[in-house]
Image (spheres, helix red, strand yellow):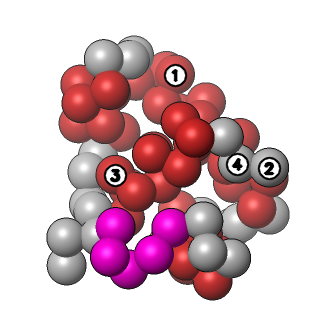
């Protein structure tokens, strides 16, 4: 199960933010963001970040409305 914080990280990644930008936005370290991303990838069995975002949308973890594009 994806936590609320992990969902927030996926939404920010889907909006094109870098790990450093996400860390600044959430007042966390880059190491913590990297750990969140690795954990999310593992939980979703994603091969990379793009695949992780696609799976998150497909599984209704995030919606296209969460993205700026």
Nearer the observer, 36 or 7: 7
What mark, if any, has residue 12 been given in the picture? Answer: 3
Which region shows up in magenta? 62-66
Q: Is residue 1 left or right of residue 65?
A: right
Q: Position of residue 17 (x, y in %)?
A: 26, 51
Residue under circle 4? 2
Callout 1–callout 4 Cβ contact below 8 Å: no
Q: Is residue 53 visible?
A: no
Q: Is-magenta flag for residue 63?
A: yes
Distance of mark 1 from mark 3, alpha carbons? 14 Å
Q: Nearer the N terminus, badge 2 or badge 3? A: 2
Please tell me the numbered disc located at residue 32: 1
Question: Upstream in the sequence, badge 1 or badge 4?
Answer: 4
Q: Earlier in the sequence, mark 3 or mark 4?
A: 4
Mark 4 near mark 2, Cβ–Cβ under 8 Å? yes
Q: Position of residue 14 (x, y in %)?
A: 37, 64
Kindly report which numbered mark, 1 or 4, lies closer to the viewer in this rendering. Answer: 4
User: Mark 2 or mark 1, which has the lower sequence index?
Assistant: 2
Q: Check disc 3 and report its element: helix, strand or loop.
A: helix
Image point (53%, 36%), residue name: 5
Position of residue 12 in the picture relative to residue 9 (left or right) = left
Determine which residue is flagged by label 2.
Answer: 1
Element at badge 1? helix
The answer for how far apart the CA atoms under marks 3 and 4 are is: 15 Å
Up-down relation of residue 7 to residue 28 (above or below): below
Instruction: Identify the residue at image location x=52%, y=22%.
Output: 32
């Amino acid at each position: 199960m994806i936590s609320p914080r992990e969902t927030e990280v996926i939404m920010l990644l889907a909006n094109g933010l870098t790990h450093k930008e996400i860390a600044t936005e959430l007042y966390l370290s880059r190491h913590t963001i990297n750990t969140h991303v690795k954990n999310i990838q593992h939980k979703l069995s994603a091969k990379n970040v793009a695949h992780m975002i696609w799976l998150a949308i497909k599984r209704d973890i995030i919606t296209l409305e969460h993205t700026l594009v």
